[in-house]
Amino acid sequence: MSGRRRIAPPSTPQSILRRRALERGDTARPEEWGVDSKSLRLPANSDVDARLGAGGKVVRARRQDVFDLLVARGRLAPDTLGAVRRLQQDMAVLHRTLSGVRDFSPRVDVGRDPQSFSDSRLHAGERIAAVLELSGAASARLLSALCEAAVVEGRADDWRAVVERETGERLADAQGAALRAACENLAGAYRLFDGRRRRSDDRASAQ
C-alpha cells in the first residue's frame, strides 16, 4: 500500500481563496521579486545592468545606453549623467511609463487621457519644457530624440544615426562631441532652473 500514489484532494472555494491570498502576499513583498535571470544571460541582454537583492535575486535591471558608455569612457561627468537621468525620469512621469521589476523594457500608456493628468505629470511636463528651452534648440532636439525613444517607446535607437539626423554631423568623433555638448548644456540648464526655483521659493517665504 505504501507505493500507492497519493491523490490530492479536490480544490474547494476556501482553498482557492487561501492560495490566492498567499500569492497576493508574495507580490506585496518586493524582496521576493526578481527578474528572470535566464533571460539576462542571453547575448542580446549583455548590456543590461542588473542589481541583486536579498537571496541573490535580480530585483532591478536596466539596459545600459550611450550615456553609460560615455561615462565609462571618461567622456561624460557623473553629474552630467545625473542631468540626463533626471530628464528621462521626468519623461517617464509625464508619459506614465511603467517599468516592472521583472521586465526591464519600458512600457508606456499611449492612451494618455488628458483628464487623467495628475499634478506630478503636469509638473514633470513643465520641468521638461523649461530645461529643454534653457538647453538650446539644438541640444533639446537631440536629447529629446534619444531620450524619448528609450523612455517612452522602449526603443534603443542607433545614437550615431540620431546625431547625424538631428545635427547633420557624420564624423564619429564629432558625433560624440555633439552629444557630450548637448548633455553639458542640459546639466547647465538644470543648474539655472534649480537656481531660479530656489530664488522663487525664497521670495515666496519672505512674503
Image (cartoon, rainbow, N blue to C red):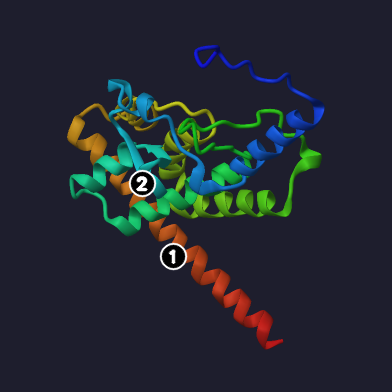
Using the image, determine if residue 142 lies above or below residue 203.
Answer: above
The residue tagged 2 is 182
Residue 112, horizontal then vertical, whole percent: 71, 34
Residue 191, horizontal then vertical, whole percent: 44, 65
The amino acid pointed to by label 1 is Arg
Residue at 30%, 43% in the rendered image? 68
Left or right of 119, for residue 105: left
Separation (CA) of disc 2 from disc 1 = 14 Å
Query: The N terminus is located in which quarter?
Result: top right
Check whether the beta carbons of the residues at disc 2 and disc 1 lie within 8 A of each other.
no
Residue at 50%, 38% in the rendered image? 101
Using the image, determine if residue 103 lies above or below residue 25.
Answer: above
Using the image, determine if residue 45 lies above or below residue 186.
Answer: above
Residue 82, horizontal then vertical, whole percent: 39, 55
The residue tagged 1 is 191
Residue at 62%, 76% in the rendered image? 201
